Image: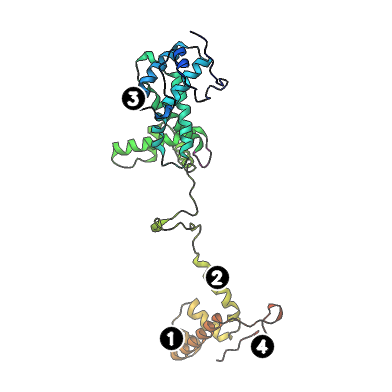
Amino acid sequence: MPSVSVSRDITDPLHIETPVETPEVSEALGVPDVPEDRVAVSTADARTLSVALFRRLNELQEGTPEYSYVRNTLVELNLSLVKYAARRFRNRSEPLEDIVQVGTVGLIKAINRYDAERGVEFTTFAIPTITGEMKRFFRDTSWSVKVPRRLQELRLDIAKAHDLLEQRLGRRPTDRELAERLGISTAKLAEGRQAANGYTAGSLDAPVGQEAEAAPRVLPIGEEEEAYDRIECLETLKPLLATLSDRDRLILSLRFGEELTQAEIGDRLGLSQMHVSRLLCRIMTDLRAGMLTDEPEGEGGAPAAGDSARTVPA
């Protein structure tokens, strides 16, 4: 065979450069004429050309310019396989261009490993290799939090075992049943489930609850604590209670501390039930008004003169 000079950088086995196709090159390499636009070649023509190119590839010595020329021509003819496999993952967050690039690496590996003498069609051999390369890319780069490889694989095993046992048992499997199925301890099972939380990170702007169809909003990190309002009310009451007379504080203590009735309070203080009722009404009105009214402040934030004490008539 005459020597053929093909411009090609063969230092990188994954390097792809568009071959300059001429009838002389094809004839010298002993391969059929390939259209200049390889991407536009139909699937049937690409399959036919690939068979002839693989036969010729097996006859060439790896590492030579001729070998690289034929191999890269095969890559370009079969890029449609990569795009076909990439469509399965079009809904993922990774850019489609990155998925196609990773799939092209899988296509090159499939071409390097393919043996035409075994009688297996190249498409049947290449698709699992391309898809496996894409899945390996997702496994290594898609986790929001990096976890050990063993936990990544354990997450997949747990999911598969859970679906299998759920179909077999007709119910959700218990942790013990899952652990026995996987041959691990319940502690290892819990570790695998905890690691699965690192696959996807939730956004604080993601919709939650029944408002999932609405615009994103910040997730409620905490919830309102009722005790805070109670503490605020008690702190506000302290200075107001200090202004009450001893009898008024005693009435409040008997009514709300010991939870005595108005009649029982009257018996203990020697008052009628009606008198106790009027006193309680007046005390509660004054306290309520004091809590809703801001005290005027003097210089330095201190209460104004004359407001340091409150006089409540009996």
Q: Nearer the viewer, residue 13 or 256?
A: 13
Left or right: residue 271 compared with residue 126: right
Q: How far apart are the two marked residues, 3 and 2, measured between alpha carbons?
A: 80 Å
Rounded to the nearest whole Å, what is the CA distance between mark 1 and mark 4? 37 Å
Is the Cβ of the residue at disc 1 closer than 8 Å to that at disc 4? no
Tell me which segment is drawn in magenta: 142-147
Of the pair 93 and 177, the residue shown nearer to us: 93
What residue would you read off at disc 2?
Answer: 231
How is colour applied across the structure in the image?
rainbow
Secondary element type, mark 3: helix
Kindly report the distance in space between the C-alpha atoms of the residues bearing marks 2 and 1.
31 Å
Name above or below for residue 13 compared with residue 167.
Answer: above
Residue assigned mark 3:
44
Q: Nearer the viewer, mark 3 or mark 2?
A: 3
Residue located at (33% from left, 42% from top): 172
> Given this view, does label 2 or label 1 mark the residue nearer the observer?
2
Q: Which mark is on residue 55? A: none
Q: From the image, state whether disc 3 or disc 4 is nearer to you.
A: 3
- Residue 280 seen anywhere in this rendered image of the structure: yes
Whole-Å distance between the Cαs marked 3 and 1?
102 Å
**Which of disc 4 and disc 3 is earlier in sequence?**
3
Which residue is outermost to the top? Answer: 1
Query: What is the CA distance from the residue labelled 2 to the residue labelled 4?
Result: 27 Å
In three-dimensional space, the C-alpha distance between marks 3 and 4, rounded to whole angstroms, equals 101 Å
x, y (%) of residue 292? 54, 81
Residue, disc 1: 263
Name the quarter where the C terminus is drawn: bottom right
Quarter location, residue 51: top left
Confirm whether residue 185 shows in the render.
Answer: no
Amino acid, disc 3: Ala
* Res 306 label: 4
Amino acid, disc 2: Ile
